[in-house]
Image (cartoon, grey):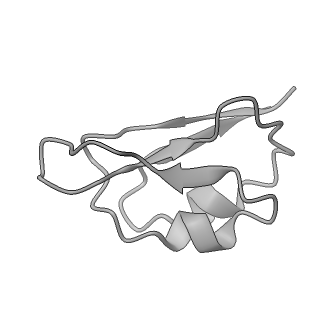
Amino acid sequence: MPRITINRDKCKGCLLCVSACPQGLIVVEEGFNLRGVKPVKFKSGGKCAGCALCALMCPDCCIEVYK
C-alpha cells in the first residue's frame, strides 16, 4: 500500500498539496511547526493511492511518496 511522509517543520503551509490530493487525504494540523505556521498532515485512516500529486505540487519538497 502506498504511503506518504510529510516534513512538518519544513512545510510553509501553502496548502497546494491539499488542493492537489484527489482523495482529500491531506489536511491542516491543529498546532504550529517551527516556522510558526500550521503544517499539513496525512488524514488518519486514509488510504493513499500513490498518485504523488501532492509531492509534485509541493514547492519545498516536503512530501515523499512510497509505493
Q: Is residue 67 left or right of residue 58?
A: right
Q: Is residue 35 above or below residue 7?
A: below
Give the residue at x 62% y 59%. 54
Residue nearest the observer in this picture, 28 or 21: 28
Give the residue at x 66% y 71%. 20
Q: Is residue 27 above or below residue 18?
A: above
Q: Residue furthest front?
A: 30
Q: Is residue 39 above or below residue 57?
A: above
Could one spot residue 47 in this view of the protein?
A: yes
Rendered image quadrant of residue 53: bottom right
For the C terminus, give its image quadrant: top right
For the N terminus, give its image quadrant: top right
Give the residue at x 20% y 42%. 33
**Where in the figure is residue 15, as x and y percent of width and height?**
45, 69
Q: Is residue 21 left or right of residue 51?
A: left
Could one spot residue 57 in this view of the protein?
A: no
Give the residue at x 56% y 64%. 17
Rendered image quadrant of residue 9: top left
**Where in the figure is residue 31, as x and y percent of width and height?**
27, 42
